[in-house]
Image (cartoon, rainbow, N blue to C red):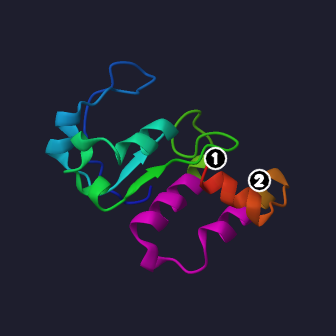
Amino acid sequence: MAKAELVHQCQPSSPKGFERVTIEEVIKENPDVIFAQEKEFVKQVYSNPSWRSIAAVRNHHVYLIPNIPFNWVDRPPSFMRVLGAEWIARILYPHRFSGTIEASVAHFYRLFFQKELTPKQIHSILHR
């Protein structure tokens, strides 16, 4: 939905997905951006020497996917993917957007959850 090219192509071994990828595969594919679901991975990737040659890591383009109230890009499949697609597109193509992701998050939560978020709550959602 965000018009990004997924560099790692594979056949899922189960309907749940979550395929394991080796560091060798990531080095070979050398992604420009990495979207991760695990906070610990994002924390450790910058200190692990094995990852230093990967463009996304060198350029500090490793992003933790927001997951409040649930994952924005993965399971469970839901309307949160609409916001996730915008979040990804804004990261990949920031020049194509006016306004901020914070304003979009505030609008989305107001529209779908009838929740007025504070700037602190929005920051917490985006930077868990």
Q: Is residue 104 left or right of residue 114?
A: left
Furthest-left residue in this view: 28
Residue drawn at (24%, 43%), measured in percent from left and top?
49
Identify the secondary structure beneath mark 2. helix
Residue drawn at (66%, 52%), measured in percent from left and top?
125
Residue drawn at (65%, 39%), measured in percent from left and top?
70
| Amino acid found under the numbered disc labelled 1 | Phe
Q: Quadrant of the N terminus?
A: bottom left
Q: Is residue 97 above or below residue 31?
A: below
CB contact under 8 Å: marks 2 and 1:
yes
Of marks 2 and 1, which one's residue comes earlier in the chain? Answer: 1
Q: Quadrant of residue 20?
A: top left
| Amino acid found under the numbered disc labelled 2 | Phe
Q: Is residue 27 above or below residue 115?
A: above
Q: Can residue 38 be seen by looking at this rendering? A: no
Furthest-top residue in this view: 14
Label 2 sits on residue: 112
Label 1 sits on residue: 79
Identify the secondary structure beneath mark 1. loop
Question: Is 47 in front, or is 120?
Answer: 47
The answer to whether residue 106 is magenta is yes
Read off the magenta span: 83-107
Question: Is 41 in front, or is 89?
Answer: 41
Q: Position of residue 77 (x, y in %)?
A: 57, 37
Q: Is residue 47 above or below residue 108?
A: above
Residue drawn at (14%, 43%), measured in percent from left and top?
28
Q: Between marks 2 and 1, how big is the CA–CA gap?
A: 9 Å
Mark 2 nearby-residue class (10 Å; few <14, some 14–19, many ≥20) = few
Q: Is residue 90 left or right of residue 127?
A: left
Q: Is residue 92 left or right of residue 90?
A: left
The answer to whether residue 78 is magenta is no
